Image: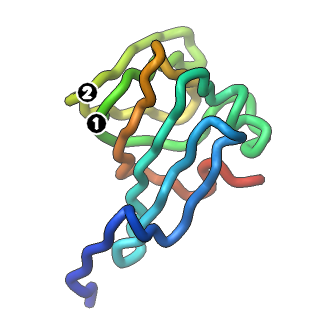
Amino acid sequence: MAQLIGKSFENPDEVREFEGKGRVELVDLNGHAVGRGTFEPGWRWSDNVKPLAGTDSCQVDHIGYVLEGRMALQMDDGTEREFGPGDAFHMPPGHDAWIVGDETCVLLDFGGLKGYAQAS
């Protein structure tokens, strides 16, 4: 039986760095990872995470909510979308993403973060 649990991102269970342009802090809630991603201006998945992932595009399924800043996304099929504060999103596997503008983007990710920003 799962336990009632709560954790703070101020004391995460794990931190994964993005090649000098941000990080994701993870808390584990009874086997369910929740991440707070901080993406600095100039961050781009294909530049800052791809070297760790070893795939042509991000193969992680993200479901989340943007707290601040803006992130753009392009799917492998060319479809593009931009997300900003207050937007909930689903980013299926097979995408590139980047920060729009000069503001840091902070978002919560409730999707499958297994393997995200880790060496394959």
Q: Is residue 96 left or right of residue 65?
A: right
User: Which residue lies at the image location 42% right of the left edge and 63% below the top edge?
Assistant: 33
Q: In the image, what residue type sits under mark 1?
A: Leu
User: Which residue lies at the image location 35% right of the left edge and 34% below the top edge?
Assistant: 90
**Position of residue 21 measured from the top left corner of the image (x, y, whole percent):** 62, 35
Q: In the image, what residue type sits under mark 2?
A: Pro
Q: Which residue is mark 2?
A: 85
Tell me if residue 12 comes above or below residue 52 in the rendering. below
**Position of residue 38 measured from the top left corner of the image (x, y, whole percent):** 47, 41
Residue 38 or residue 72, whichever sits in front: 38
Tell me if residue 82 comes above or below residue 60 in the rendering. above
Residue at disc 2, secondary structure? loop
Residue at disc 1, secondary structure? strand
Q: Could you say which disc has been placed on residue 67 in the image?
A: 1
Residue 35 or residue 80, whichever sits in front: 35
Q: Dot 2: few (<14), some (14–19), or many (≥20) neighbours within 10 Å?
A: some
Which of marks 1 and 2 precedes in the sequence? Answer: 1
Tell me if residue 37 comes above or below residue 29 in the rendering. above
Q: Is residue 120 left or right of residue 33?
A: right
Asked whether disc 2 touches disc 1, contact meaning CB atoms under 8 Å apart, the reply is yes
